[in-house]
Image (spheres, coloured by chain):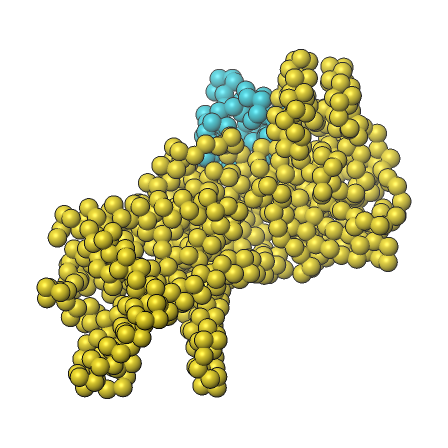
Chain colours: A yellow, B cyan
Amino acid sequence: MSDKIKKIALLGNPNAGKTSLFNQLTGLRQKVGNFPGVTVERKSGFIKLDANNEIEIIDLPGTYSLYPTSLDERIAVNTLIDINNKDYPDVIIYIADVTNLDRHLLLLTQIADLDFPLLVALNMNDIAEQQNIQCDEKRLSNALGIDIIKINGRTGNGIDIIRTKLAQLLNTTNNNSHSNFYELIEEEKRLSKKVSDLFPVKNEYHALLLAHHAKKISFLNQDKKRQLQELVLQNNFNPINNQLDEIMQRYNKITPIVNKVLSKSFTNAKTVTDKVDFIVTHKIFGPLIFFGLMLFIFQAIFAWSIIPMDWIDQQFANLSTYLQSILPTSIISRLLTEGLIPGISGVLIFVPQITILFLLITVLEEIGYMSRAVYMFDNIMQKFGLNGRSIVSLVSGGACAIPAIMSTRTISNWKERLITIMVTPLISCSARIPVFAILIGFIIPNYKIGYFNSQGLVFMVLYLIGISAALISSYVFKKILKSEEFSFLMLELPEYRKPHWKNVFYTLYEKVGSFVFGAGKIILLVSLILWFMASFGPSKAMKQAVNVATIESSLLNYDIATTNLHIASKKLEASYAGQIGRFIEPAIKPLGFDWKIGIALITSFAAREVFVGTVSTLYSIGRNADNLTIKQKLQQEKNEKGEPVFTMPVALSLVLFYLVAMQCMSTLATVYRETKSWKWPVIQFLYMTGTAYIVSFVVYQIFK
Amino acid sequence: MENPFNITQLKIGESAIIAEFSNGFVACKLMAMGLLPGSAIFLMRKAPFGGAYYIKTKNHYVALRTNEAKNVLLINEKKSI
């Protein structure tokens, strides 16, 4: 019977341990994509159960019932009520948490009424034992008429039984002997009959669900949808009332069963969670602990990543040098050593930061801390159109916007997630630090103000400007963007648990992989283009640049190193990047920037810190370039009239430009990947760079 | 306390029994999350900055915004959990 690959869906409430079971079943054979048309992540894995059965296991988003309240939940429900869905399951493995059995049985009875072949994996038995809860799973199985297997998602106990049962189930027909849990009332039966005359349905409950979801069904065409909605209207069907009655009726059946099969000695003792939350969610200590943790993450991203980042940088530089020494000089070898290898290095250099950030965030998520942060900051973030979870992304953005944007995936409300993605790059990331460090000396001399250092204070002000800009932009986006999703907060705060390291590992593996192979491809491509533009130009102009530079160098008696620098600088001027720099000069002149800064603005697109390398090449025309720091080179730089280029207004304008403008193509590539559309990275680029232009313009015009 | 009252009128550390919900959407969601009429609830905390309410029921913890918390109508229980 196995000519097509069978689909097995994993379903359950949030926090039931679905991810652990999924990882136990599939190991590293996981594929992460998106459900068609939406940005909800679709995780699946292919496994071979036995000679007959090759199956695909799909991890459906967690939901409390078949009446969804978020996009994720709706995906799960749409998959289960659309019999033509690509992912419509042949069998459902339902994960239930024995410590909250009644609630977990609600959704189970709903999918049982949809006549799916079912297996129940009863999880959290170890925790139940600690709480003195005993569950007689045989009686439960008999009472429900559904197969129940006790498992431990952490140790993998019971997983082999799941596999065996699954194979049996696939080779036979429906195993479940249960009668319907929910009896439709007369009015519902009538409506259900009319729906089933129009649409292919499995049974009357299925038809009722279609009627219930008439407005939100994505898989019917407009005509069918209208027909369905008319039907609902004609029959005066009130979804909310019927939904309430259905849930009550189900609980009326579930509660007696649960009382029969569970024996628990209820204790009054404070749980670990009670004790921890007494401090962790405290009005004052709570936020303090949160900022302490975020500071720690921020520090970790900075401090722990330096060594691996330098190592990666060094290895690739060595590789380039080595290849340069053995390969004949040609376009191909230059492409390899100056374009491709630095490009790959530019992707991999982010891996340590991404790994560290996700390691720490995943651990916080696993132990249950993140939902506490959401609870504490929900109100304040909401005022700016953000979500409690956005605060994590905003703080991470202080290290690097790329992992920060990737971490918005935990925000289920699409509008709130999108706003977070759009504003996170305004938080000053680590790549801006070298730029600020060089330019800050032109803004303010270094002196002490009390205990503080003047330049340090300016640094802090720059960070505060970034944070304010992010919050103001969120507020604006909140007013502009429309959302059909209703905003509310009814959030379960899971009990604190030890992190499950296997889950942490799989999450890291997947996130880092999706960065390297997803965003990485685009970063590589753009850095190749930038390399080409900075290395090549119209051949006549390039030749002339080399000649002029050589003659000038010999006239000025430069040594070989300085001569080479001078040639490099003149070539960069003549290159396509240089041409563009000159081309955009009229546009950036009002900001106080000359065409050389223009070139740096363009090359900064590879990464902001490239600014330093570019200006260092451009301004290396001095007598003895090696002995001067970049800052000294900038100080000596004069324009045609002999006035210094880097004055206070110019530096201020430039710093603000770097603070606000979207200049990081890696971030844009990540935004594209996360939003699945070029629309949002383009809007992000335009609004950030546009604002930067206006701010720099105003500031320069005031101070010049 | 006069009946009926709602979660926002509870003091931290007080408990009560859910009587009913005054909003269908909130009712459906909370009931699916296991908060049923008749369940005892205990107010653990109010969030800093006047935000959400953090409540505990027999085996789980739930956070609600003020808007949602207002829709959970309570009656006094005989003795606290």
Q: Please tell me whether residue A265 is drawn above or below residue A402 in the rendered image.
A: above
In the rendered image, residue A588, in percent from the top left (x then y), is placed at: 24, 53
Q: Quadrant of residue A66?
A: top right
Report the residue at 24% width, 78% height from top: A549
Can residue A47 be spotted in the picture? yes
Q: Position of residue A370 (x, y in %)?
A: 50, 48
Q: Is residue A627 visible?
A: no
The total number of labels drawn is: 0
Image: A677 above or below A534? above
* A354 left or right of A438 in image: right
Q: Position of residue A149 (x, y in %)?
A: 79, 47
In the image, A285: left or right of A361? left
Residue for point 67% across, 13% down: A234
Q: Closer to the camera, A671 or A390?
A: A671
- Residue drawn at 62 percent across, 50 percent down: A33
Q: Which of the two residues, A294 or A243, is positioned nearer the viewer here?
A: A243
Of A344 and A80, the residue lying toward us: A344
Residue A694's place in the image compared with A362, above or below, is: above
Pick whichever, A249 or A616, lies toward us: A616
Query: Could you tell whether A262 is left or right of A142 in the image?
Result: left
Tell me which corner region of the image, top left, top right, bottom left or bottom right, holds residue A270.
Answer: top right
Q: Residue at x 65, y 55 (%)?
A: A31
Q: Please, which residue is most extreme toward the front here?
A: A540
Query: Where residue A96 sits in the image (x, y, percent)?
Result: 71, 42
